[in-house]
Amino acid sequence: MDYLHRFVFGIYPYIALAIFLLGSLIRFEREQYSWKSESSQLLYRGQLRLGNILFHLGIIGLFFGHLVGLLTPLAVWDALGVTHNFKQVFAMSAGGLMGGLCLIGIALLLHRRFLCDRLAANTTWRDKLVLLWILATLLLGLSTIVVSAQHLDGHEMVLLMSWAQHIVTFRGDAADFIVSASPVFKLHLFMGMSLFVIFPFTRLVHVWSGFGAVTYLGRAWQLVRPRG
């Protein structure tokens, strides 16, 4: 097996995960004032609401779709009577829907950020990097639907699932499963893993705060009374 392939798909995932976790922790400890989404609403509100809603709806759906689709053991799907063919078609349909919403959303966000002079002047290179990186990863992901449509037997899907499950269970033969996978899938995986590498150094860290916001649902009511 090629050493580059083994490194990218057998070792690099752990490097990306380490940078993602440790980098986020270090940034939270040292740069808490930069721990924010850096909203641009005050500079220009146009297309922000629609773009944000579509982008976040799509990317959250894609994240949990990948999480469940890749990490649920095949034995579970088999026990539920879900065939590989059905799972692949469902994944293509759901991924296409969520990916389409995300693509429209990010296109609106990119349009307002690059074509509005006030926003462009306040956009850092890190903002541009993360938006363009997500766009490239998304386009590659949508391209995999075209590749998958050429063979609906679910074979390549099973290989990708085996790779992901062997990675999270720290088994050293993970890279072996996707040697024959399409280059589009491999590039999509690399871009997706690299997104975790740049995560701690961009505004993406606000995602952690989003998970923490769930605790608000269990908090007691705050009663505010006017004076007098």
Image (cartoon, rainbow, N blue to C red):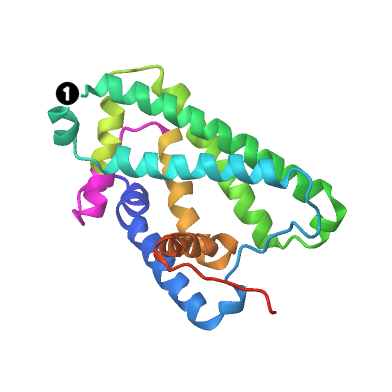
Residue at 21% x, 57% y: name it: 170
In which quarter of the view is residue 55 placed? top right
**Element marked by disc 1:** loop
Where residue 68 sits: x, y (%)? 31, 41
Please tell me which residue is depicted at 63% across the width and 48% down the height of the picture: 132
Q: Is residue 137 above or below residue 194?
A: above
Q: Is residue 137 visible?
A: no
Instruction: Check if residue 169 falls in the magenta segment.
Output: yes
Position of 112 compared to 219: left or right? Answer: right
Residue at the (52%, 39%) spot, across then down: 58
Residue found at the very far front of the displayed protein: 228
Q: Residue 131 location in percent, x, y?
A: 63, 50
Position of residue 29 relative to residue 52, above or below, is below
- Is residue 9 depicted above or below 66 in this figure? below
User: Does the magenta run of residues contain 30?
Assistant: no
Q: Nearer the viewer, residue 35 or 13?
A: 35
Where's the N terminus, which quadrant? top left
Residue lying at 47% horizontally and 45% vertically, measured from the top left: 60
Residue designated by label 1: 81
Is residue 172 toward the left or the right of residue 194 in the image?
left
Q: Position of residue 152 (x, y in %)?
A: 33, 18
- Observer-nearest of 188 and 97: 97
Quarter of the figure that contains the C terminus: bottom right
Q: Which residues are magenta?
A: 164-183
Residue 217 position in % (x across, y down): 43, 60
Figure quadrant of residue 203: bottom right
